[in-house]
Image: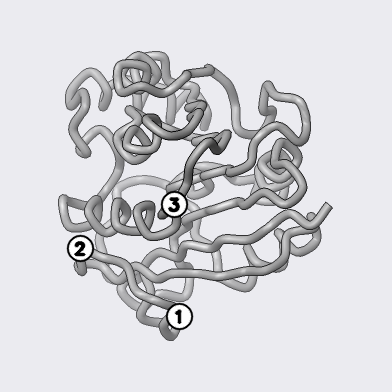
Amino acid sequence: MKKFWEKHFNQKAQLFGFSFLAGDHLDGLSFHSTQHLIQQVSKGWKDETILDAGCGNGILTHSLTSLNYVVGLDFSLPMLYLAKKKGLIVVRGDALYLPFKKNVFSKVLAIGLIQYLDNLEGVLRELVRVLKPGGEIILTFLNRKSFLRKIIPETLPLHKYSFNEVKESLQKLGIRNFSCRSQIYPLPFSLPRLPSILVTTWLIKGKKID
């Protein structure tokens, strides 16, 4: 599947460039909701060392580069070329085998990443490994229990997870102090935690305790 996704995103980078259309957002409303999520969780960040895993064209985290050190990781070279133009420090790599030492980043973001991977435990282990003790990990993922997810047409083989499934996996890796936000398509903004059946995409944030 890696070759499938690499070809998919190479083509989207070439077609859409810096547009949100280079990602797999359903539409502009979906993109703005995700953008709102990032704005909510990154308020006050300054002098942070941030990993944007699966950064794509850098459109979601480029606003953080003026006050922080933002490393964008992706396996698509055309996407990384765009992200570099957006001010990210880019590294080509696989999220299942991150090319970084342990305890490097104070913030680790994986926005819309784990839906493309079939090894949840493996990617979470890597993301937590490179996170400093006391640092924060922020993930978004498609909600398997969403009613709307059952009726929204899908053309790509994406993975979905329940909130508790991801939270419990992170807990096993030493993540605590959880908080979350909810996306409900087609609302162009995020909300505090709501009943799972309503939520199309979850954001979960936690802190590494050791």
Q: Which mark is residue 188?
A: 2
Mark 2 secondary-structure assignment: loop
Q: Which residue is mark 3?
A: 44
User: Which mark sits nearer the N-terminus, 2 or 1?
Assistant: 2
Please state which amino acid type lies under the numbered disc 3: Gly
Res 9 → quadrant: top left
Locate residue 20 relative to residue 24 in the image: left or right. left
Answer few, some or many: residues within 10 Å of disc 2's Cα (few below 14, many 20 plus, some between 14 and 19). Answer: some
Q: Nearer the viewer, residue 69 or 159?
A: 69
Please state which amino acid type lies under the numbered disc 2: Pro
Q: Which residue is mark 1?
A: 196
Locate residue 55 relative to residue 15 in the image: left or right. right
What's the residue at 79%, 55% (across, down)?
Answer: 173
Q: Nearer the viewer, mark 2 or mark 1?
A: 2
User: Which mark sits nearer the N-terminus, 2 or 3?
Assistant: 3
User: Which mark sits nearer the N-terminus, 1 or 3?
Assistant: 3
Locate residue 35 relative to residue 109 in the image: left or right. left
How far across and how far down the image is residue 59, in percent?
29, 35
How far across and how far down the image is residue 42, in percent?
43, 52
Q: CA distance from mark 1 to mark 3?
A: 29 Å
Q: Nearer the viewer, mark 1 or mark 3?
A: 3
What's the residue at 25%, 67% (across, down)?
Answer: 185
